[in-house]
Image (cartoon, rainbow, N blue to C red):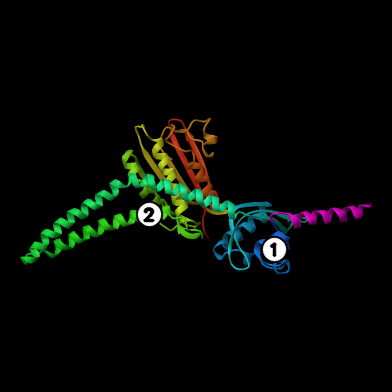
Amino acid sequence: MNQVDRIRENAEMFEQLLERHPDAIQSVDSDGHIIYANATASQLLGYTREELLGMHISQLYAPELMSLVKSGFLRLQREGELSVCDSAMLDKDGQRIAVEIRSFAIYDDRGEFVRTFSIVRDIRSVKAMHDRLMHASRLAAVGELAASLVHDIANPLSTIRLAGSLLQEELKLVQLQQVDPESLKTSLEIVDTAVNRIESLVVQLRNIARSDEDTPQVFDLRSAIRDALVLVTGKLRKAKVKHELHLPETSCQVLGRESEIEQAFMNLFSNACDAMQGCDRRVLAVSLAGEDTADGRRWRCQVADTGSGIAPENLPRIMETFFTTKAKGEGTGLGLAIVQSILRHHGGNLDVASSLGQGSTFTVLLPALG
């Protein structure tokens, strides 16, 4: 066999490997048009190979993801490699498919970008398992929070009961035509405020518990942080922890599942509270700011406590699943692992800095929208 035949045989073998690969494989040119798709890609997306070839990659993604797709394509051309843990493509019928994508850039001899080579993995079954874990964790969080919110709900109820007694007395004055309109108005406002407070707490608990939020939505990160802080207020009060909140005045938009981000911050706030048990100074400081990076703009939120800190030998392991330094029965070791999982599914990350006796600072990084 001569060299030409050997090259042809190797090329045919490589093509068969691509065609039979269990993951979808596609290649996109510098203009974003598909120039190669294997049989798995055709099966996954419901298009024939002929339909896929020449199609623009933007036709395969949901509209709300396009800004991330465009920025990711530019980053891939610049850096040569890109991994996306949680994305969603649209099949021919418009149905969303949860996918994990790993892409490589191919350059010519002059170093000019020519095309991409992407491996697209269907992670719908993995995503379903992830969602069940998130839901179970949220329900556990709701159970813990419900106990800590008894005080927050009992206070407005007592206020309503007192206002109701005042209104009954004022009703007697109405019958005697001695009613004070301003007094009636004040009593009704007190009732309205207390009811709104209870309603707000119930809505927040329901939002944390819900599991049907499949489609990423645009939301204000500040709202997720505030709501998470409200939900742990009872625990902070019981542990005598003061909190400081520093948020921008303008909207901080992100794309994702707000209930999951709220859950991530609830876990961080709750852990910070536990870390400060027995400490003389107990302060939870939360700050949020934007920053520009080579990959685009992102939000940096720091959650700092004045707790006992984390031992150096434990620091590399604190985000491992089931690793915990808490006493038996006080922790599962899932809290930080779940936070990290949530953030990575949103294209973000979690960093930590800590010193024994000096407290810890957890930094949440999330891509900004736009």
Distance from the alpha carbon under mark 2 to that under mark 1: 42 Å
- In the image, is 153 to the left or to the right of 225? left
Between 260 and 19, the one nearer to me in the picture: 19
Determine whether 50 is above or below 41 in the image. below
Residue 224, percent across and down?
A: 42, 53
Q: Total number of numbered labels?
A: 2
Residue 55 appears in the picture as rendered: yes
Residue 357, percent across and down?
A: 43, 30
Question: Which mark identifies residue 330?
Answer: none
Magenta residues, start to end: 1-23
- Badge 1 marks a residue whose secondary structure is helix
**Residue indicated by mark 2:** 204
- In the image, is 132 to the left or to the right of 152? right
Magenta span main SS:
helix
Q: Which residue is depicted at the point 59% across and 55% down?
A: 124
Q: Do the residues labelled 2 and 1 touch (CB within 8 Å)?
A: no
Residue 228, percent across and down?
A: 40, 50
